Amino acid sequence: MQQLRRISAIVLSLLLITGSLTVPQPGLAKAAPDAVTELTFTIMHTNDEHSVLLPLPLIDFDPTSNSGSGGGFARLASAVNTIRANKRATGEPVLLVSAGDYLSGSPFAWLALERQAAELSLMLSLGYDAITIGNHEFDYGADVLAAYFRAAGYPRVGKTTPIVASNTVIPEGHALGEAGIQKTAIKTLANGLQVGFFGLLGKDAIEYTPYAAPISFSEQQAAAGAAVAALEAAGAEVIVAISHAGPVEDGLLAKSVPGIDIIIGGHSHEALQQPIVIGKTIIVQAGTQLSHLGLLELTYNRETDTIRLRNETNRQPYLLPLTADVACDAIYANKVARLTDDLNALLARLTDNRFSDMSQAVLHTNFAVKNEPKLAETPFGDFVTDAMRMIGEQVTGDKVDFAFQANGVIRGGLEPGTLPGREGQIALFDLVNTVGLGLGPDGEPGYPLVSIYFTGEEVRRILEITALLPQLKGDPFFLQMSGLRMQYDPARAILAWIPVKKIPIPTTRAVVQAERYTGSGLQQDNNEWAPLERGDKELYHVVSDHYLAAFLPMVGELLPSLGLVMKDKQGNPVDVDDCIVYRDGREFKVWQAVLEYAASQTPVSAGGLPELPTYYAQTTGRIVPVRTLPIWLWPAVGIVVLVLLLVFLFRRWRQRRRAAHA
């Protein structure tokens, strides 16, 4: 029988790739739980789905072909249903869970602002057994999240698909408390096995929940310890943590909290081809954007209270790539198509009917526009900030000197189409997908553009923040820029640390050289540059997005030497909401600026698509790291010189004293 299961698993893996498996679906065999020592079961898992209901890049999606883009919810449904059918034939129970961030990322997330739960409705239909909450679920705020869960059918559907969020603290009376969110949940499988779940939002993930208030989060390990104790007391035999934290934090959790058998992870977007095993805890993660379906084949031994992995014995991979070879499930393809119609209608409303089809091609390029490497200027970062600067100038009617955008809200680059007839094309969906995060005070999708005036000295401080923050918070806080170029030494950003509080003392001397572009249009390597000096009191026009503009002055509150005061054209202090850019009475969004910049490029031929300039095939020297002498060297040299001078003077004094007594 075991040999038969091995053969069956091998066949399943091969046929999942071709998408051609058809399996009979007899009734699930019921095991007598008390009569069996070893119980087999399977856990399928996804994470960081990020509203990617359709494959990416969309321009290369062809549901009738086995080439082009992979991923998408219809392929996920096909793979899940295939595995369930195969396991049903052998009487093995199957679970399906998500480790969070199913909302936000692609334009489909915008439907949440229309009181629709596009992602979660599909997940519930597919039969997820448990989910947790990721940081991006809070991108539109706790109130919108509460409405999102309500639109999906919570708390009623929580009996089938519980939301487990053990360290999420919801104030009494808040609407999110009505969603039926649980600290723990137990599923009794058909073979009698009791599987307990709890959910966590990790420390790093919490850093990216600026709109979660008044929701807060308790300490992870304490919450996990309490959850494990509660599940054990309730009779759970296998305990699964659904953790939106990443392998590093998951590893610490496994070491610190005994009793966790499996950690289904998320947040870091890692596709772990092999589980990480720490002690008796199995840690897994399945990438991002439905690139893979995670699969754990397991056996639980009641006598020894241990779990054994069966994947390798069965020659079953831990991750199943949802490539174009996996056929799309027709039922779920139709469900996604209906949601796409809703999204297109929303797009038409938001753009005053200028654009009404997310799949339409809006740009042509013969090269990919990369959003790499991390912690550096990128070609796509140049494109986005140029769009903000130049389209911002058109909308505001005033020359824009500088534009800034953070890597954390630039969600990828541009990959041109490769399928016949689509070569070099960029779909509107693929373009907007990279810059469509967030919402403005108007409650509409996307962060609005903001128009602010800073002195030259304050712009220099923003550049110093660019050098400093990524060292503390990582790549999401690295700033791309337009209208500027600078040389900087990251090693000079921090002079020292304040003990206990772990607050850095910035040198404000990391930027070695800064210049502003005095020309118009694309900034070129020509003579249209002027120094941006320290202490410059002149006001310069800066555009950014609402999120970044609200964040940057907070740095100055903690580190006064990097303080910023937002001002209007006359130099009067203003609040960030006063700086929002409007067009025709509506907030003008960053994604609109990028879309309109793409559409404004010159076509190669009459009637052709706008052509992306080769200018964006590589970076243009805007942010150049350099190595200089360490910042501490000059004070050290000064101290040495002072000591030598004192020694010299002391010796002279002694010589004179001796001479006086001779």
Image (cartoon, rainbow, N blue to C red):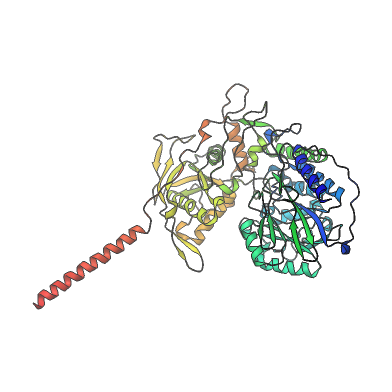
Which of 253 and 29 lies nearest the eye of the viewer? Answer: 29
Residue 29 is left or right of residue 279, and the answer is: right
Query: For this rendering, which residue is in front, 222 or 435?
Result: 222
In the picture, measured across the screen, residue 485 lies left or right of residue 155, that is left
Determine which quarter of the picture holds residue 660.
bottom left
Asked which quadrant contains residue 259, the reply is bottom right
Which is more toward the observer, 137 or 601?
Answer: 137
- Is residue 658 left or right of 193 when viewed as pictured? left
Residue 459 visible somewhere in the drawing: yes
Q: Quadrant of the C terminus?
A: bottom left
Residue 413, percent across and down?
59, 40
Estimate the x, y position of residue 448 in percent, counting from the top left: 61, 46
Across the whole image, how many numbered discs are drawn on residues?
0
**Is residue 209 visible from the viewing direction of this image?**
no
Residue closest to the far bottom: 661
The percent coordinates of residue 50 (x first, y second) are: 69, 47
**Residue 407, position in %: x, y?**
56, 47
Q: From this viewpoint, which residue is outermost toward the top?
A: 606
Task: Say which of 223 and 535 sits in front.
Answer: 223
Residue 571 horizontal side relative to residue 429, left or right:
left
